[in-house]
Image (tube, rainbow, N blue to C red):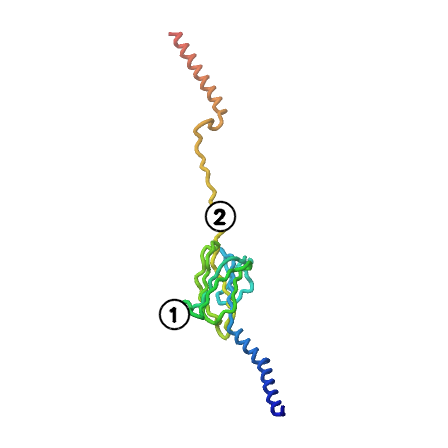
Amino acid sequence: MNQRSETVVKGVFLAFLVFLLVGAPLVVSAETADSYALSIQKYKLDASTSLPKEFLQDGTKVEHAVDADGKKLVALPGIQYEVTRVTPISGGTDYQLVEGAAAFSTTIVTDQTGLARIDGLAQGMYRVIEKNNGQLKNVMEPVILELPLPQAGDKPALSEVYLYPKSSVVSSKAPTEKPKTVERLPQTSGNIGNYRPFIPLSLVILIMGSLGFLSMCQRNTRN
């Protein structure tokens, strides 16, 4: 092999190394940039639960899961969410399901920490539906979100979106009943009050009757 051929072979080999060191990472980065995630965090909320401002539905992660009074929120496992890829209807505000090769639909379930997460999602619009399994008093309204999710101002779009459903659960507390008032009926039999005050009165009546009887007898004797 002459010197020129060796130079060509070395050039091809160096070009191959450059592709492995530079080109391959670029391909991986491109695949990663087109992959997004959705995390749904469900807590056991009821009608009396008040949430702080941190629970704004802007897609960001809430770092401290507490209510407005500072009490830690309880996770709710076993809640299902249907995630379906949709597309806007031309000339309207509604959405329709994506069909064909780009169609996507799956159901995810919250674990013991109340989290249901799915990654590897393609860029696009998704509809999230909360399903009732008897634990919820009412389900959240269907949510349409975009991946990546644009942010206000100069903030970068979110590649992972966090969703916090605020639907309330069925209360396990039995409804409190007002204590029943026992009505006291007037006494219609038996002794009413104390009978002792009537003894002197009875004696007086007896004496007066006896005196009247004796007076009548004396008058009859005189006549």
**Labelled pair 1, 2 in contact (Cβ < 8 Å):** no
Q: How many marks?
A: 2
Task: Give coordinates of residue 80: x percent, y percent.
Answer: 49, 59
Q: Is residue 217 above or below residue 42?
A: above
Q: Is residue 54 left or right of residue 5?
A: left
- Packing grade of label 1 (10 A; few <14, some 14-19, many >=20) is few
Image quadrant holding the N terminus, namely: bottom right
Can the viewer see residue 70? Answer: no
Q: Residue at coordinates 47% horizontally, 23% vertically from top-left?
A: 198
Can the viewer see residue 120? Answer: yes
Earlier residue among tags 1 and 2: 1
Secondary structure under tag 1 reads: loop
Q: Residue at coordinates 44% horizontally, 30% vertically from top-left?
A: 187
Residue ID for mark 1: 89
Q: Is residue 22 left or right of residue 59?
A: right
- Packing grade of label 2 (10 A; few <14, some 14-19, many >=20) is few
Q: Quadrant of residue 126?
A: bottom left
Image quadrant holding the C terminus, namely: top left
Q: Residue at coordinates 45% horizontally, 17% vertically from top-left?
A: 206
Task: Give coordinates of residue 144: x percent, y percent.
Answer: 44, 66
The alpha-carbon separation of the residues under discs 1 and 2 comes to 47 Å
Secondary structure under tag 2 reads: loop
Q: Is residue 219 above or below residue 40?
A: above
Kind of residue indicated by mark 2: Ala
Kind of residue indicated by mark 1: Ile
Residue ID for mark 2: 174
Q: Is residue 2 above or below residue 201?
A: below
Task: Give coordinates of residue 125: x percent, y percent.
Answer: 45, 69
